[in-house]
Each structure stands twice: as C-alpha cells, then as structure tokens.
Amino acid sequence: MATRPANRLANETSPYLLQHAHNPVDWFPWGGEALERARSQDKPLFVSVGYAACHWCHVMERESFEDEETAAFLNERFVSIKVDREERPDIDGIYMDAVQAMNRGHGGWPMSVFCTPEGKPFYAGTYFPKEPAHGLPSFRQVLQGIDEAWRERRDETLRAGAAVTEIVAGAARLDGSHEPLTDEIERVAFSSLRRAFDPRWGGFGGAPKFPQSMTLEFLLRLAVRGTPDALDMVTATLARMADGGMHDQIGGGFARYSVDQAWHVPHFEKMLYDNAQLAQLYTRAWLVTRDERWHDVAVDVVEYLLREMQHPEGGFWSSQDADSEGVEGKFFVWSWDELVELVGEPIAVAFAAEPKGNWEGTNVLWHPVPIADVAPRFGAEPEELSAQVDDARRVLFETRATRVPPGTDDKVLTAWNALAIRALAEAGRAFDEPGYVEAAVRCARFIWRHLRADDGRLLRSWRNGTVGGPGFVDDHALLATALLTLYETTADIEWFAAARRLGDDLIALFHDPERGGFFQTGSDAERLVVRPKDVDDNAVPGGNSAAAEALLRLALFTGEPEYERIAVSALRLVRDAMGSAPSGFGHALSALDLYLGPSREVAIVGSPDDPATGALTDQVVRVRFLPNVVLAVAAPDDAAAGRSVPLLADRVQIDGVPTAYVCQRFTCRLPVTAPEDLAAQLTQ
C-alpha cells in the first residue's frame, strides 16, 4: 500500500505528532493557523490530545484517524488539532478539566474535545470506538451529532462552551486560605490515607492502581517523624510493587500502573517520570530502613534508565510504548512452553506462570508467592532456587532482546529530566556510586546547554536538536530543586547559582501576586482561553507544589523571607484539599512538611576532598533520610562559595579542621568538628 501524503504534522518534532503525520486527517498542530482557519471557515475545533506511549491513542488512530471516510468528514466539517500532552501540559490541563467537568470527574487519553473557534470547549470525552460499544457511541456518531449541533443549535453550543470555560477557570481563581498551616493538616491527611490503604496488596484503593510515589514519600516523612504505622504502609507497598508484574522482572523499571489491585498486569508503557520518582523513593526507603531489598530495586530502576532511556549526550527520553508490533504488551509476556524450554518449570512456577497463561493466554511474570514457599515443591532450598531465578533473568533478558522492542518517545522534557537528575544524585551519594552522580551532572549540563533560549529562558522540550516552546512552572520548579540536590551532592556552586536563577524566574514569570500561588504558563506565553494553575499532584508534582518546595529550599539556603512567603501562598491555595484528598496532593503535603519543620541548615567548611569533611557529610548527613535538612559545603578558602551561598557566608574552621554549623532559620548552634557531635545536633 502506498504511503499517504504527509499532513502538517510532518514538520513537527514530537514523536506523538509524527505518528499521525500520514493520517488522512488534515491535522494541524496547536497554533494560530488552526484557530484562524476555524474562525475564517466558521468551523468548530476538534482537539485530540494524547502521548506517544498511550495504547488507546494508537487504537483510536487505527480505527478512526486512519479511516478514509471518517477523515473526510472531519476535514469537511471541523478543523482538527493534534496535541502532545507532554509538550503542552497547559492545553492538556485546560481540556482535561473540561472532560472531567462534562463526564462526572472521569477523564483520560486519548482526549477528544470539541471547541468553538476561540478554543472554548463545549463537548468532550476520551476514547470513542469505531462502532458503538460498551455504552459508548461510535466516533462517527459523535462527529455527526456535534456537526448538527454546531449548524442547528449554535446558541446552545456557545452557551455550553462559555459555561464549561467558566468552570475550567475556577482553579485559577482560587483564593488562598487565611487559616494557619499546622500539623493538623498532616494528621488529617494521614488518617484518610490509612483508611484508603490496601492491607493485602499495599497502595491505596482498588483497580486500576498507581504507584503514588508522592503519597508514599509523604508517609516516609511521617515515618521519620515517628508516626505509627506510616513506615509499615510504605514498606508493604514497596514490597508488593517490587514483586508485581508492574515491575519488569526481567529488564527492570516500572510500568505506568497496574490494571488490577494486585500490581500484576501492567499498562505496559514505561514513563521516565514514574521511574525517576520510584528510584528516589526506594533509595530513601533504604536510607530509613537499611533493607537491602530497597537498595536492589532502586539500583534496578537506575540501571534501566541508564541502559534504555538515556540520550548519548546525557539527557533522558520520555517513555517507552506499551505496544510492539501493534500488540499491547507483546514484548514483555511469555508463553508457558517458552518459559519451560528456556529456564525450566521450577523457574516458571517461581514467576507464577501458568500453562494456560495468567493474562490473555500469556504470562506476565511476577512473584505473588515468596520463592521460599515455591522451593519445597521442587525439593530445592530457597537460596538455591533464588539463585536460579537470578540466572534465569539473564537468560530471559537475552532472549527478549531478540524481539521487536516497543517504540521510544525520544524527546527530552525539562521537568521529567529534573526528576531523573534528583533521583540519580540521591542514589549516587546514598549508595556511593560516583557513576550515578556523574550521570546526574551530565543530564543537568545537557538541559542547561540545550533547553534554554538565547536569552536564558528555560524551554520545555528538545528532540534531535530542535527545541520546543517556553518552559512551564513545573519545568522551572523541578529543575531548581534538582539542581539544589545536585549542589548538595557535588558542592559545585555552579548548580546553586543556576537553581537560584530559576527560583527568581519562577517568581517573575509565574507568581500570582493577587491570589497567591503560580500560574502554569509564564507571563510571556501565548494567551489561551484560561491561564491555568496546576494545583494538584498527579503522575508528576503539580506546578504549585513543586514551586513551593523549590522556594522553601532556597529560603533555607539564603535566608530570604520573600522566597518563603511566596512558597506558602501556593500551599494556602490547597490548604483544605491536602487533608481531605491527600492522594491528590502528595507533593504539596511534603512541601508543607518542609515548611512546618523543624528544618535544619547545615554548613560545612572543609575541602570536599578531605576525608575529615567526608566524615561529616557522608557519614552523618548523606547517610540518612533527612528531608528537612539542606547542606552546603565549601573549602575554607572558597570565597566565591561564601558570596554565592549565604548559608556559607562568614563561616570559618575551628583549629584548621573541617567544621560544621547547624542552624535553624540562620540561628546557629556552636560549631562542631566531630561527626558524633554533628549527629547529635541534627537529632535535637
């Protein structure tokens, strides 16, 4: 079959948009040309939003967007716009709010939104099948109904668009609470999470089940504070996730979520943001518990990212598809006969495989039963079978490598790379793996070199040398926090200076001085129907909570009260929601915990290469999970560090040996030189 002529998407860099470049649909990318076409031709907009690794996006493309008759109807009656939600989270957020407003809180991707030529949504849904099924109309029926409404009931349609736009604008008009921010919010949130906790399988709620890394991070913070049951909830969830099929037992890393309650069958796509956050979470769990299992999982995830998701110059790609050869999960699953032939029946049983398959006739490998319970069935010792399972993983990995792999979305997103930088830096210093820290540095240099405009403005995306548009609030906030972590890890003031610049840009470009918090788009960005605020935490930290954390950490390093004041304004926007709906505000709760403290600022004056300095940093500060501590290190003759990092200003050594200062809001205790004295001050 001859290749169809390319449409306008052929000039784009997004892999998701390029996947649709040969559809018969006359797609436009988002922009002025499409909106002007809709106005001049008096046609409604059809805005289709998705992402490259989205399985149902591929299904709807095959069923509808590649169908000549459907495409002809779209081209005649609509102006069609295709949007990569990862490159344009602002558009995605606006129209997802519309989808949820019209569908009782339900939403997802692909997102299908019909708008006036001005972009006001008046009808919205997600996936529509080619033929009516499961209570859903066919896509053709939807198109015909929308076309009829636009031509025959225009006034009604315009009123609907205005009403939905008003609802969507609501989040941007939130006013901050004037009630105090107290520990009671955390207590209420914890009680809610404990009620929602799944005691058998870990996690929260039923199917589908998501990792909720930020919620678990909040619980880990409470565990450090001594909250009963918090650590048990975290470790039970980490164990079940690690044993589940959502965790790739052969190649490492985690899929996006589990379609069932038991973490068994994944939605097979792998996202950079999930794996970065889970690598960080498992690393921090190891710091708290010293359970080697968490070390092994964290290393497994990091090694997966470095092996399969890293650009040769150091940045990280966005995702890997669920599908290969057009079939969901085909790359990852196994038949019983194949497993038995390759690794033997005991290993197949250890992976809970079944002759008839445990998912659609094939097997998703997992460990619902401990290997120690499987071994006696085959007359083996648990240690022996466990070693055989490890050997089998290598065999299966090599066999799987001969299959057609899923596609990779090879664009580099600033915010998601920031999550990777932070995770790599923390894993590197926790596990004494310099290679991980170096990978974090390479990634940071990649972002700082490739994802800034000539005037220094941070950008959202990069692919094959072509950059996307201006960065959003989460790009600035998450990168600022990541670079502060990198500074704490390397003591290189270059990263502190870059983080502070980003913090200042956060305020200048995104802060709402009237109502508090932060807009998602910069003051220099194009105007949409709504200037949105990203106030809740979903798969990645929301822009408001990420900005709050970044500025609170900068306040600890600098003593600047304005950073803290503006950060707190973001938390006030969601004060009540944090307690009542904690699973949607995990990162905000962690930022609240940082604000409530007690926090500590640690300044160490000593050469970073001096073993005595390492005794203070590596054996006391970096060896624990101290979420509300910031660390600044500089040699005694490093005047530039003292000028750049206010926490280091005027600090001197005692008796010429590395010296630590422990401060709280820049009020410092007596300096100490012995590691045990520093440890005591950090726990008092």
Image (cartoon, helix red, strand yellow):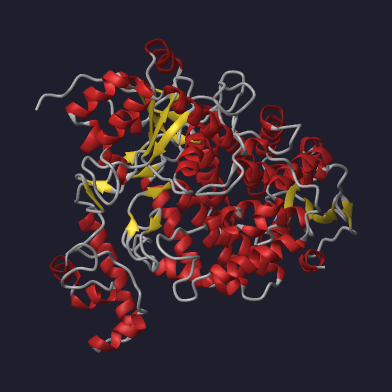
Q: Nearer the viewer, residue 559 or 47?
A: 47
Can the viewer see residue 48? yes
Q: Is residue 606 above or below residue 200?
A: above
Q: Is residue 430 visible?
A: no
Name above or below for residue 427 compared with residue 97. Answer: below
Residue at 71% from the left image edge and 51% from the top image edge = 575
Query: Residue 572 in the image: x percent, y percent?
Result: 73, 47
Quadrant of the rendering where the N terminus is positioned = top left
Q: Is residue 649 left or right of residue 585?
A: right
Residue 453, horizontal then vertical, whole percent: 56, 21
Question: Residue 68 location in percent, x, y?
Answer: 17, 27
Name the side, left or right, on which 212 lies relative to 384. right
Q: Is residue 22 left or right of residue 410?
A: left
Q: Quadrant of residue 557?
A: top right
Outermost residue, left direction?
1
Residue nearer the viewer, 249 or 430: 249
Left or right: where 577 falls relative to 165: right
Does residue 201 lie above or below 130 as drawn? Answer: below
The quarter of the rendered structure image containing the C terminus is bottom right
Q: How many marks?
A: 0
Q: Position of residue 456 (x, y in %)?
A: 61, 23
Q: Residue at x 23, y 65 (%)?
A: 363
Task: Please determine whether, in this image, residue 118 is positioned above or below residue 306.
Answer: above
Name the residue at 40% across, 63% down.
207
